[in-house]
Image: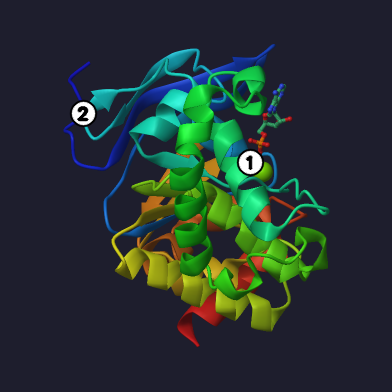
């Protein structure tokens, strides 16, 4: 098989993972370009979160390769992937309610960048020397998500929207080139969703590249430069929002999905409104 042309910030080639007899992700070849917003969509169970788990080093693929800035990162561990500039948020973020917002971001960052939990928890000599840098980095991340004024409040006092922003700040604290957002608007009302979209656009204008998994089609259609569509673990379409929303394979996939067929219909309308 010929080598795929290196075109993106992150490139996957023939990527796959099997769980038991199930191909959760199968033979996906795709690129996430620099300086853009790439959305990964697909019906429930399509393999979207698994795709993120693969490219962020949480799972080791059973087939294929992952390249970041041309470097083969297929078998690297999460903290090694983070060190190279890929950071992610989770569908649910653990918030340390008693700690301040700033401390929570510092700990979240430490857990992601150390080889082991013990290493993250022990305050080694190096850790102490790093403390000031870590605090400054966490503060910069809070500034980027608009939470600097709340830095010293208990994290538990924040609104749900605020807590989502803390999750994004935890990822930004490692100063990534590529930010992966897994369902960032889940549970948000329309106003919160609009503010989140504005934040993501600002981050990209500041030089960050973003890939996101999202069910809310209005968000995806209004925000993404490019969309990758997964179905049963396979890439069935890719292109601009306008292109994928009229792709017959995509329409069929969504119509066949009871859970999300309605959302696709809504989203196409929202995207062209
Ligand atoms: N760790 C795992 N072990 C076994 N099956 C898994 C695991 N993670 C995901 N799956 C399965 O892989 C498929 C894709 O899941 P997922 O990536 O979570 O879908 P999505 O995020 O698109 O809703 C599902 O059938 C899911 O049950
Ligand atoms: Mg998911």
Front residue of 57 and 218? 57
| Disc number for residue 4 | 2
Q: Residues within 10 Å of mark 2 (few under 14, many from 20)?
A: few
Is residue 233 visible to us here?
no
| Disc number for residue 181 | none
Establish whether ligand 1 lies closer than 8 Å to the Cβ of label 2: no
Q: Nearer the viewer, mark 1 or mark 2?
A: 1
Q: Which residue is mark 1?
A: 107
Front residue of 140 and 93? 140
Ligand 1's quadrant: top right
First along the sequence among labels 1 and 2:
2
Assign a secondary structure to mark 2: loop
Q: Residues within 10 Å of mark 1 (few under 14, many from 20)?
A: some
Apparent side of residue 117 relative to residue 77 in the rendered image (left or right): right
Q: Residue at x 47, y 46 (%)?
A: 132
Separation of marks 1 and 2 at Cα, in angstroms: 38 Å
Q: Residue at x 56, y 25 (%)?
A: 58
Looking at the rendering, which quadrant does residue 107 occupy? top right
Residue 270, image x, y percentages: 55, 80
């Amino acid at each position: 098989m010929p080598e795929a042309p290196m075109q993106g910030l992150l490139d996957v080639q023939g990527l796959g993972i099997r769980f038991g007899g199930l191909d959760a992700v199968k033979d996906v070849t795709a690129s996430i370009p620099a300086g853009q917003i790439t959305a990964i969509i697909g019906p429930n169970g399509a393999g979207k979160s698994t795709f993120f788990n693969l490219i962020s080093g949480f799972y080791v693929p059973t087939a294929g390769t992952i390249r970041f800035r041309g470097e083969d990162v297929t078998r690297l561990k999460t903290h090694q992937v983070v060190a190279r500039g890929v950071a992610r948020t989770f569908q649910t973020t653990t918030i340390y309610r008693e700690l301040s917002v700033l401390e929570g971001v510092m700990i979240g960052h430490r857990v992601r960048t150390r080889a082991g939990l013990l290493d993250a928890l022990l305050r080694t000599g190096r850790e102490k020397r790093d403390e000031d840098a870590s605090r400054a980095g966490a503060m910069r991340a809070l500034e980027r998500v608009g939470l600097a004024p709340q830095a010293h409040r208990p994290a538990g006092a924040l609104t749900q929207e605020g807590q989502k922003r803390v999750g994004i700040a935890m990822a930004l604290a490692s100063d990534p080139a590529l930010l992966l957002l897994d369902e960032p608007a889940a549970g948000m009302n329309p106003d919160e969703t609009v503010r989140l979209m504005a934040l993501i656009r600002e981050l990209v204008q500041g030089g960050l590249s973003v890939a996101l998994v999202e069910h809310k089609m209005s968000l995806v259609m209004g925000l993404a430069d490019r969309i990758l569509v997964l179905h049963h673990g396979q890439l069935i379409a890719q292109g601009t929002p306008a292109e994928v929303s009229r792709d017959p394979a995509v329409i069929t996939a969504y119509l066949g999905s009871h859970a999300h067929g309605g959302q696709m219909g809504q989203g196409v309308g929202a995207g062209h409104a």
